[in-house]
Image: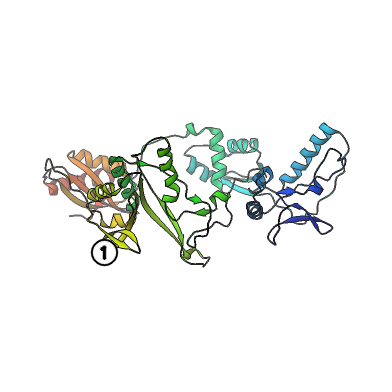
Amino acid sequence: EITLDSDMFVMTSNDKPVVLGGIVGGIETGVTQSTTDFILDAGNYDQRSIRTTSRKLHINNETVLRSDKFLDPRATETALARATELILKLAGGNYYHNDDYYPNPVKSKTMKLTLARLHLVSGMDISLEKSKKILTALGYAIVEQNSYRLIVEVPYFRTDIEVEDDLIADILRITNYDNIPTSPLKTPVPTEITPKIYKFEDKLRDIMVRLGADEHITTSFVAKDKLKSRVVLENALTNEASALRTSIEETLTPTLNNYKKHGIEDKVIFEIGLTYSRLSKDPVYTSFCEQKTLTVLSNQDIRPVLSSLMHELGINYDLTIQNGNVAVCVDKEQIGTLTLKSFSIKTQALLKYAKSYQGVVSEFTHTTSVDISLTKNSPRLFSEIKAVIKQVSPKIINITVLEERKSNLLLRLTWEEKTDYLTEKKKILYALNKQLDITSRSV
């Protein structure tokens, strides 16, 4: 017996609930050894409603596993036909067809595949005729065709097809990904766009490993509780993963306990990950907070590890008592917390205060650099420009693209030793103009 609420979808008979739609049937509608007549029903349900209701009632069966995913409504007809066929084959009997009231049926999805996009993404000369043959074999129907595009109807069972590139992925999968040609890069290397925090977190991982710690990556999901700052998921997959952690210790501690269970007492483990907290009862996104932290746990005194980490980063820190907890502070700013066997520190704060280690310079080298501005009067590959510069001045060790706009290019040329760069520059500009029709505003 279960308790229903107004958000649960049910099927009724004479105003009496007999089935939880898309989840499970009741006793009165069940099949027994004496059943001789029954009605087959196949429906398509709102996935959000199925998932919410099943989690509330702790029901997790095969029906739920299917119904809480997106399924095309047209699959119900196929399912009914197949179920009827199997019942008649195995048990015998007769069936009677009953038309469904379906005033607004789902329309088949049509998508466009252009030859230009196919060539751009694949890098291969695949014809539309070959593409048509592959897509037809995969269940697509060709609606319209001309010399530069196909209009196809997507099979009802392919709910994963959303954009044109999904069609191209199907074609390449059948054509064989190994047949995609490879070629060297002929354009300037793209500007580095990796955020500093990502590189810094990699540095933190290297330091922690050098200090003898093992990295672990744990899930951010935990069971919900009465903690006010806890972020609770409205549509969780399971009850054990119905909320988000407020600290990494929650999910990392079981790993440390597992080491202890196997007799490993002196282990130091760490994780760099996100923690989540709710700032107010306001349901909008701004009332939630994500924080990236480095958390380190051990069964031993953790303070030497913290000291070594801060030394590696060149950070001078203080320990103070705030609200009954030991706070890790830098320049009077709290950047983390410390206990006897664990500490957690904000990675963004560590990046802010970390100092570069200069290291020991074993030898001194002198370089000469000069910037030149070029104008391409006709289309030219960067590889062609680079080849001419290297040919004219073999001692150049680096050619960096500082800026590129349409036909204009700003380069920085670097030589390993002191060089008469004015003479070299004139030679280079002369050769570029002579061989590639490239001019320069640089003097």
332 lies left or right of 119: left
Is 273 in front, or is 172? 273
124 lies left or right of 316: right
Residue 313 is situated, as x and y percent measured from the top left of the image, at: 24, 50
Q: Looking at the image, what colour scheme do you see?
A: rainbow
Residue 375 is situated, as x and y percent measured from the top left of the image, at: 28, 52
Is 386 in front, or is 251? 251
**In the picture, residue 170 is in which quadrant?**
top right
Residue 153 shows in this picture: no
119 lies left or right of 421: right
Residue 296 shows in this picture: yes
Is 391 in front, or is 134? 134
Which type of secondary structure does the marked residue at label 1 adopt? loop
Query: Disc 1 marks which amino acid?
Result: Lys
Pointer 1 residue? 332
438 lies left or right of 363: right
Residue 54 is situated, as x and y percent measured from the top left of the image, at: 65, 51
Q: Quadrant where the C terminus lies?
A: bottom left
Residue 123 is situated, as x and y percent measured from the top left of the image, at: 47, 39
User: Across the whole image, how many numbered discs are drawn on residues?
Assistant: 1
Above or below residue 102? Residue 216 is above
Disc 1: CA contacts within 10 A as few (<14), some (14-19) or many (>=20): few
